[in-house]
């Protein structure tokens, strides 16, 4: 299991050996100038280069990843919801020590991932905790390692628990999804956004991009729809994909004014 090939650039684990990585060859990502290189979880663990990192990111939200980060370097978020712990997004590195730390926090009841760049070793995580993975069917083609643990869903929303809702915004990827936790931030609401609503250095705004590394803007109609969908939810904080990438206050207003600013820049009113 731990010897399935993993792309060193994006962290996607595949079911069998291959020369190409479709995720990296897509225009939203890139093949490094040094070329495509491969590893596996056994090699990563045996290297001694990585150690688990588990740190609080906000009220009831625990960051889960490694030091240093591997591949793209995102961290996952453990949401300590009333309905049970839920893992949002996925970090590529996983070892027995990290599994133990998450179990000591109460384990997880399920996993949902914002978009294919963070699918990584999701099947390893699902098997370690014997839980399902919820992915939007719009991104089915990008699954590198198919498995019965993967549960595809369709439409605009999916309640994975009575207090946790997935919302398909379609930003960045067709299946680009965020997680709304109304009880987050001590009842003020939290939006877990991955790269779908990107937390940027200026915390008074967020970003919307089709490709972040290649600087391809998202289509205006997609951003407009995303803002309209999120207008129906309230949230104080926005948790992005990176350690401490968090909008702490006025999250709802931040999204709406960011969409308005984006559309003003990309839509030619003339």
Image (cartoon, helix red, strand yellow):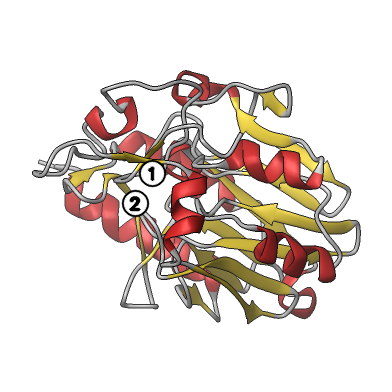
Question: At which x and y percent is residue 131?
Answer: 80, 40
Image x and y of residue 38, in percent: 32, 38
- Residue under label 2: 208
Classify mark 2: residues with Cα within 10 Å, few (<14), some (14-19) or many (20+): many
Residue 34 in view of the camera: yes
List the residue tagged with mark 1.
223
Label 1 crowding class (10 Å Cα cut-off): few <14, some 14-19, many 20+?
Answer: many
Q: Residue at x 14, y 38 (%)?
A: 35
Left or right placement of residue 253 versus residue 204 in this view? right
Q: Secondary structure at mark 1?
A: helix
- Of marks 2 and 1, the one in the foreground: 2
Q: Judge by depth and name the residue closer to the eye, 164 or 10.
A: 10
182 to the left or right of 239: right
For label 2, the SS is: loop
> Where the N terminus falls, by quadrant?
top right
Q: Quadrant of the C terminus?
A: top left
Q: Position of residue 189 (x, y in %)?
A: 71, 68
Q: CA distance from mark 2 to mark 1?
A: 7 Å
Q: Is residue 154 above or below residue 212?
A: above
């Amino acid at each position: 299991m731990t010897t399935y090939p993993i792309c060193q650039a994006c962290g996607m684990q595949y079911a069998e050996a291959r020369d190409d990585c479709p995720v990296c060859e897509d225009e939203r990502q890139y093949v490094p100038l040094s070329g495509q290189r491969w590893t596996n979880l056994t090699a990563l663990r045996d290297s001694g280069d990585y150690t688990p990192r588990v740190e609080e990111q906000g009220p009831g939200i625990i960051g889960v990843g490694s030091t240093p980060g591997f591949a793209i370097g995102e961290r996952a978020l453990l949401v300590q919801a009333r309905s049970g712990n839920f893992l949002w997004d996925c970090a590529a590195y996983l070892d027995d020590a990290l599994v133990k730390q998450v179990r000591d926090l109460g384990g997880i009841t399920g996993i949902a991932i914002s978009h294919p760049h963070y699918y990584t070793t999701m099947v390893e995580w699902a098997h370690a905790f014997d839980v399902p993975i919820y992915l939007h069917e719009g991104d089915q083609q990008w699954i590198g390692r198919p498995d019965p643990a993967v549960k595809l869903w369709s439409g605009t929303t999916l309640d994975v628990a009575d207090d946790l809702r997935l919302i398909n915004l379609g930003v960045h990827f067709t299946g680009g999804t965020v997680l709304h936790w109304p009880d987050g931030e001590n009842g003020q609401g939290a939006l877990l956004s991955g790269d779908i609503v990107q937390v940027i250095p200026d915390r008074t705004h967020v970003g919307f991009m089709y490709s972040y590394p290649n600087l391809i803007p998202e289509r205006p109609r997609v951003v407009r729809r995303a803002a309209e969908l999120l207008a129906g939810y309230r949230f104080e904080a926005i948790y992005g994909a990176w350690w401490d990438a968090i909008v702490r206050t006025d999250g709802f207003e931040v999204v709406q004014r960011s969409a308005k600013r984006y559309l003003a820049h990309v839509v030619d009113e003339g």
